[in-house]
Image: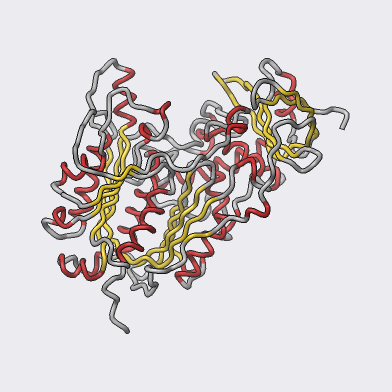
């Protein structure tokens, strides 16, 4: 065999932490705890001083103003982590938002390491939403403010994930957007609402069983399909136990370096995990996608990762698919040619609804689990997938303890979307035909319906039922209305109200 190129990027440390109770600590403390565990995992002493880059995945409380924490924040999260672990990196990065970020930043830093631009990178992230909510419920005052003078790169929130016309018509919360995607997929599969709910519950029960055996899971125990279905409804398809649970105290961290640096630091060969296939890409806005229930860029991202690795799905052992909502799993399973009925293991952690959904950082936990799993089976290959936004931003990685030969300096890891298929938007339609729909629950009752539809000129629009229009909501719930004709009534601004056109 040829010797391994000294510039080859490898993962050498992975750490996680969880606090199932409430202890008042801020998210930077959990990120630092996970970082310390990742350093210990390398088997090498004094590693913190060698870290030249620390990247912290953006906390939920810093992602949108409506999620701001009332107890303050660190004004430099990478430095807060560095200070706690005794590191003094030359570069500190606070990332953009999105569940894809841990995998996407690993792609970025693998390239930088292969080019000799970085030597030892710490990626860390966490959430302390359980602590925050416990304090708010119990009138406890916390002080999470920290101020640092060290420079850092703040990548802020990143790209817009929703358009004003989507938000104005009810596609604002992820649960509502994903429910519409889910319904589109149910309609294509020919499943009734009841049949699709049962299908999702079987898949999620399998995830829950895996989470129950994971000591790093936020939530103890497992749920049956019946228990998942019996939880309070959030939309016509989803119950509260079908969606990501963000009330967690969890942290995860990874250490990425080159083969040469690992040898210099004395990190044993059996701790090295190689990167065999990496790719990422972005879909158009949800309302612009030709088929809201499909995700062609996700398929292209997977294909690129497999091509770089020179592998097919038959070569893959452990898999962790991003699992914020059931359709996020079923889309990937479909591209991989795997079942989504719970009969094939598609998670290592137990998934965001059961293991826990630590904001933008979940995939860091998946990769950390993968590192440990592959060290126990060094001939295996494992697959991690991630997504951010409304099934918008995709990233995938194929890993193994086997040596990799990919030259990551110039590898083509970014997949472009197909703009030719993007639907033009109209904000003043007169009528149209439903492409996708959902009904949103408020206070335990069906409150309003939301549709994505095409007008008679093949232009796309989003609309919602008018306040108090119980009749249209009831009609949506009575039968699958995909393909049904609607009449549109302009309201204020970008808001559009629709009713079903019974004449068609």
Which residue is at the front of the view, 265 or 351? 265
The number of numbered badges drawn on the structure is 0
| Residue 361 can be seen in this image | no
Above or below: residue 46 compared with residue 452: below
Extreme-right residue of the structure: 503
Above or below: residue 243 compared with residue 377: above
Above or below: residue 40 compared with residue 407: above
Which residue is at the front of the view, 296 or 17? 296
* Position in image of residue 183 (x %, y %): 65, 39
Extreme-left residue of the structure: 46
| Residue 379 can be seen in this image | yes
In-image side of 273 versus 484 (left or right)? left
In-image side of 207 versus 105 (left or right)? right
Q: Quadrant of the C terminus?
A: top right
Q: Within the image, what quadrant is residue 275 found in? A: bottom left
In-image side of 81 versus 307 (left or right)? left
* Position in image of residue 89 (x %, y %): 19, 51
The structure residue drawn at horizontal position 64% and vertical position 44%, both measured from the top left corner, is 288
Above or below: residue 11 compared with residue 292: below
Which residue is at the front of the view, 78 or 327? 78
Q: Quadrant of the N terminus?
A: bottom left
In-image side of 139 versus 192 (left or right)? left
Q: Within the image, what quadrant is residue 44 found in? A: bottom left
Extreme-bottom residue of the structure: 1
The structure residue drawn at horizontal position 23% and vertical position 43%, both measured from the top left corner, is 151
* Position in image of residue 376 (x %, y %): 30, 63
Q: How is the image coloured?
A: secondary structure
* Position in image of residue 236 (x %, y %): 62, 30
């Amino acid at each position: 065999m040829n010797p391994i190129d000294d510039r080859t990027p490898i993962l050498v440390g992975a750490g996680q932490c969880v606090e199932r109770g409430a202890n008042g600590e801020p998210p930077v403390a959990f990120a630092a705890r996970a970082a310390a565990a990742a350093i210990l995992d390398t088997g090498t002493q004094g590693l913190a001083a060698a870290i030249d880059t620390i990247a912290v995945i953006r906390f939920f409380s810093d992602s949108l103003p409506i999620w701001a924490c009332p107890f303050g924040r660190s004004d430099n999260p990478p430095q807060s982590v560095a200070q706690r672990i005794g590191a003094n990196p030359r570069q500190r990065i606070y990332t953009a938002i999105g569940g894809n970020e841990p995998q996407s930043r690993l792609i970025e830093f693998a390239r930088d390491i292969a080019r000799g631009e970085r030597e030892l990178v710490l990626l860390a992230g966490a959430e302390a939403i359980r602590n925050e909510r416990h304090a708010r419920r119990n009138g406890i005052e916390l002080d999470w403010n920290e101020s640092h003078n060290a420079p850092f790169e703040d990548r802020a929130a990143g790209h817009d994930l929703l358009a004003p016309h989507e938000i104005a018509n009810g596609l604002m919360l992820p649960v509502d957007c994903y429910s519409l995607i889910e319904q589109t997929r149910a309609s294509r599969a020919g499943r009734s609402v009841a049949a699709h709910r049962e299908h999702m519950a079987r898949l999620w029960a399998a995830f829950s069983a895996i989470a129950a055996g994971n000591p790093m899971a936020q939530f103890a125990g497992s749920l049956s399909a019946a228990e998942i279905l019996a939880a309070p409804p959030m939309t016509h398809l989803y119950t509260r136990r079908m969606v990501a649970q963000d009330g967690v105290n969890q942290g995860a961290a990874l250490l990425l370096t080159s083969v040469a640096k690992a040898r210099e630091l004395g990190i044993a060969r059996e701790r090295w995990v190689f990167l065999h296939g990496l790719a990422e890409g972005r879909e158009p806005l949800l309302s612009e996608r030709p088929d809201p229930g499909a995700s062609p860029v996700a398929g292209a991202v997977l294909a690129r990762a497999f091509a770089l690795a020179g592998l097919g799905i038959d070569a893959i052992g452990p898999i962790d698919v991003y699992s914020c909502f059931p359709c996020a799993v079923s889309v990937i399973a479909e591209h991989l040619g795997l079942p989504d009925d719970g009969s094939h293991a598609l998670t290592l952690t137990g998934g965001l609804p059961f293991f826990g959904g630590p904001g933008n950082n979940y995939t860091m936990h998946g990769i950390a689990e993968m590192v440990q799993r592959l060290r126990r089976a060094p001939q295996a290959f494992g697959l991690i997938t991630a997504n951010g936004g409304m099934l918008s931003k995709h990233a995938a990685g194929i890993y193994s303890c086997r040596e990799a030969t990919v030259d990551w300096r110039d590898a083509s890891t970014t997949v472009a979307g197909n703009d030719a298929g993007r639907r033009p938007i109209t904000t003043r339609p007169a009528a149209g035909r439903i492409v996708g729909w959902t009904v949103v629950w408020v206070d335990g009752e069906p409150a309003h319906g939301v549709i994505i539809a095409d007008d008679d000129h093949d232009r796309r629009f989003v609309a919602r039922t008018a306040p108090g229009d119980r009749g249209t909501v009831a009609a949506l719930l009575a039968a699958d209305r995909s393909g049904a004709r609607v009449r549109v009534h302009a309201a204020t601004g970008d808001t559009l109200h629709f009713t079903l056109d019974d004449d068609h």
